[in-house]
Structures are given as C-alpha cells and as structure tokens.
Image: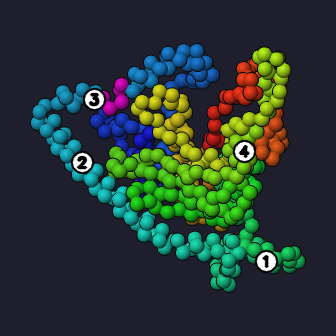
Amino acid sequence: MSEPIRNKKADFPVAPTPQNTPANNAPISSHAQQPGVSSIKEESLDNAAAASLFARNPALVSMIQGKLGQLVGRSSGYIESLPPSVRRRVAGLKGLQKEHAKLEAQFQEEVLELEKKFFGKFTPLYQRRSTIVNGGVEPTEDEVEAGKEDEEEEETKEEPKKEEGEPMSGIPEFWLSAMKNQISLAEMITERDEEALKHLIDIRMEYLDRPGFRLIFEFSENEFFTNKTISKSYFYKDENGYGGDFIYDHADGSQIDWKEDQDLTLRLESKKQRNKNTKQTRVVKISVPTESFFNFFSPPQPPTEDDESVASDIEERLELDYQLGEDIKEKLIPRAIDWFTGEALQFEELGDDMDADEFEDEDDEDEDDDEDEDEHGSDRDVDEEDTDEEDDGTSKPKKEAAECKQN
C-alpha cells in the first residue's frame, strides 16, 4: 500500500482532469480529516436493492472495478487534438509543475526538520511528566497554579478537605485511563488487557534515522511478560509521493516475551475430540488467537506481488493500523493529561455512523463476552466433526485466524 502521508499543509481544491488526477488513492493525512465530497442526488436510490444486486453478481462488481481502473489517468483525447504550438505550451507548463513538485518535496523535508526541532523542546516536558506520574517528584507550586488557571470558576471553589488515606505514589493507572478515553484505542482494550496496561508507566515517541517514527511503551515489572519496553516503528518510503508527500511503507513491532500461560493475544478453548478407532471422546484445551490491544504490536504487512492469498480488507487494515499509530503520536502523547481527565473528548469529532450510544452498546457486548472467559481465556466447548487422532493421543487442531479489533 503506497499512500501519501501529508504533513501540516493546507489543501487547495483543484479541478480534476485526466492529466492531473493521480492514479493512486487519496492520501492518509496525519493532521487532517479525510476529504469528503458532498453527494449529488439526481434521484432516490434504493441502497438495499443495489447491495443485494451486487451481492448476487460478484462478476458484475469485478467488471465495474476493472473498467473504472482502466479509466484512471487516461487522457480524454482533448490534449492530443490541440495544435502543436498549444501542445508545446502544455509541455512547458508541465515542466513548471515539476519545479513546483521539487519545492513541495523540499517543503515537506523542512517541515519534518522543524517538527524534530520542536520535538527536542517538548522532550524535557514529557520527561518531567513521566517523573510526576510515576511518583519521582511532586509538581511545583507554579506548575499547579498554572494548571488551575484554565479550570471553571465553580471548579476552583474550595471543597471540604477529604481525609487522606494511605499515601499514594504518583498517579496510578494514568496511561491506562488516558488510553481508555481515546476512542480508537479504547475499542482495542479488553478486560484482560487492562491488568497488563495498569503496569504501563510511560508512552513516548522518537524519530528514526530514516523517514518514520517509533512508539515506545514502557512497563513496570508484571506477571504477563518480561519486556521492560515494547515498541512499534512506522516507516515511510525513501522517495516522496505526489505533491512531495511522504509515503507510508510498513510498520514493525517488537516481540513480546510472554510468561507461561500469560499470552493475552491467545485464549484457551475447550474442544471435543473423538478417536476414530475407539470412538471414545475427550476434551482438550487449545490456544486460539483472540482480540487484544497487544495485537497492535503485530501489524498487518503490505502484500507482495507474488502473494496470492491477500486478505480482501488488507488496505483497510493497513490504513487503520497507521491511523492508530498517528493517534498515539499526534494526540495521546502530546496531550496525555487531557485524555486522562477526559477534557480532550470535547475536541474529538465522532463520525456520523458512530455515536455515543453505539459505543455503549459495543462495550456492553464486550462485557458479556468477557464474562465467559477465565483467567487465561474462555472454556466454552466446541462441538466439531470427528477428528483423526493418532495412537499417541496427539492431534493437530486448526487454529482460528487472528483478528484485531481496529474498527
């Protein structure tokens, strides 16, 4: 998947023509919402009927997609019909456009350098935040007073002092709470994940030597894995795309060293097996992939040209995976305290197809599903067809395909 990734740059609408319309898809923007075009309705359309028609005729869908693909970037013949002198002027304008593209690429490079420069100024603030969150130091009076300036008048009124219980170090579950308020991340976090994410003590970012960035999750000692840090790196291609934009290439995640029977990306499932000779049945436990935030560190990979088993939703999964990384880099890390308090939610714009009630419904369904899980996973019985069993009692059950809840 080669999607241009724009930096902070204004988009100017340009009327599309066969000559200036790029053959690749719309870019994934790191600082802007995806562009949309208002629909023009000439007559009412029965969407259900249309969907039913396409569902019954996959060959028709394939034919339409093929025809549309052949039209992208093709000339209408108008330019070729112009006199030679006019075509020469058109070629001259295309030459000017190439110079413009060089300046755009230079602009993007300088924007990246500017981001790196200010990231160096942000880093000491992130480091101090981490020490306060983890109980290393207390905030100064000036920092506290500055933080109170933005509070509403009624919130600044003195409340009756509450008795202090046992001394508490830092801010417990700071990052877990912040992540659960960030909707795109909250959807991925299961109840089992929460026990591990309570040990998350810092999330930080760093730029790579080549175009790209790395997200680093730091954990305290816990019962789930031995890693002190788990990271994920996002890489851009070396060459710039249309308009000088960086092009997303792929992502790599570090390996998680799970402790025995503590892999949160797997669950235990009971399965009945019948011996074909003795007809006796037995129940065995098998590990199958399950939804977990930690699947984030095993990102989908772009298909190769020789790959014939490409998932139909691979492009969507790649884009969602990249967007999650951008949300952590551009939203969660810079404004972690606002996500912890929930104040950042007022600046989030939910799509028309997802409202608060839908999120509550989904959470309720997840809770119902989680009730069926034990400490390491679910123990539900699965009745299947008889499976051949060797004399030594071993068998090779088929594992389910791993799924990542990244919708």
Instruction: From the top left corner, tell me how far across and down residue 30 is, in percent.
Output: 49, 52
In which quadrant of the rendered view does residue 363 lie?
top right
Q: Residue at x 51, y 49 (%)?
A: 252
Q: CA distance from mark 3 to mark 4?
A: 46 Å
In which quadrant of the rendered view does residue 219 lie?
bottom right
The three-letter code of the residue at mark 2 reads: Lys
Instruction: From the top left corner, tell me how far across and down residue 174 is, in percent.
Output: 70, 64
Q: Mark 4 vs mark 1: which is more N-terminal?
A: 1
Q: In front of the other: label 1 or label 2?
A: 2
Residue underneath mark 4:
359
Above or below: residue 384 compared with residue 36: above
223 displayed left or right of 125: right
Residue underneath mark 3:
75
Colour setup of the view: rainbow
In which quadrant of the rendered view does residue 194 lie?
bottom right
* Secondary structure of residue under mark 3: loop
Q: Which residues are magenta?
A: 70-75
Q: Mark 4 vs mark 2: which is more N-terminal?
A: 2
Instruction: From the top left corner, tell me how far across and down residue 142 is, in percent.
Output: 64, 84
Q: Mark 1 vs mark 2: which is more N-terminal?
A: 2
Q: In front of the other: label 2 or label 3?
A: 2
- In magenta stretch: residue 405: no
* Secondary structure of residue under mark 4: helix
Q: Quadrant of the N terminus?
A: top left
Q: Which mark is residue 98?
A: 2
Of 145 and 82, the residue lying toward us: 145
Q: CA distance from mark 3 to mark 1?
A: 68 Å
